[in-house]
Image (cartoon, rainbow, N blue to C red):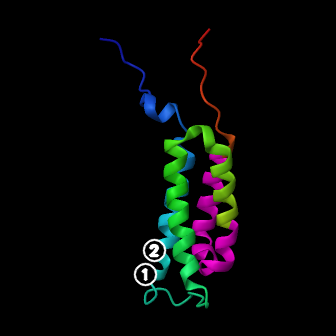
Amino acid sequence: MSAQQVRPPEWRRSRPFWGGLLIVLAGVELLSIPFSLDALPLIVHSAQAGLTYLISTTMIVLGLLVWAQPAQRTFLGVMAILLSIASVLYANVGGLLIGMVLGLAGGSLAVAWAPVSSERS
C-alpha cells in the first residue's frame, strides 16, 4: 500500500478559504471585546459603542461572503481591509489590535487569491 498525498478538500481549493477564515476570526475577536468589559481594564469607552457591533458583524458577514462568492473576493477583501482600519477608531483600538491585524491579513489574502486552473500539464 503506497502512502497517499493528503490534499485539502475540493471546496477549500476552489475559494479563498484562509482569507475568509481570518476575516471571520477578526469579526469574532472584535465582537468578543465588548462582552469582556470587566476582564479587560484597557477598554476605551466611546460614545460610538454601537459601531463596534456593526463593524464586527459586518466583518463576519464579509468573511462568509468571501467563501460563498469567490468571484467578488476583491471587493469583499478591500471592504474587510477598510473595516479593519476603521476598527482602530471605533472598536476599542481595533480589538486591542488583534482583530485589526487578523482583518488586514484576511482581507489581503482574499484580494490576492487566484483560482487554481483546472488544466494540469
Residue stretch rendered in magenta on the structure? 85-110
x 56%, y 85%: residue: 49
What residue did someone put label 2 on?
Answer: 32
How packed mark 1 is, by other alpha carbons closer than 10 Å (few <14, some 14-19, many 20 or more), is few
Quarter in which the C terminus is drawn: top right
- Image x and y of residue 98, in percent: 58, 68
Q: Quadrant of residue 105?
A: bottom right
Q: On screen, 110 above or below 29?
A: above
- Which residue is at the far top? 121
Q: Nearer the viewer, residue 74 or 31?
A: 74
Q: Quadrant of residue 6?
A: top left
Label pair 2/1, CB-CB below 8 angstroms: yes
Q: On screen, 47 above or below 4?
A: below
Q: Quadrant of residue 81?
A: bottom right
Q: CA distance from mark 2 to mark 1?
A: 5 Å
Q: Is residue 13 magenta?
A: no
x 45%, y 74%: residue: 32
Mark 2: secondary structure = helix
Question: Residue flagged by tag 1: what amino acid is it?
Answer: Phe
What residue did someone put label 1 on?
Answer: 35
Mark 1: secondary structure = helix
- Image x and y of residue 112, in percent: 69, 41
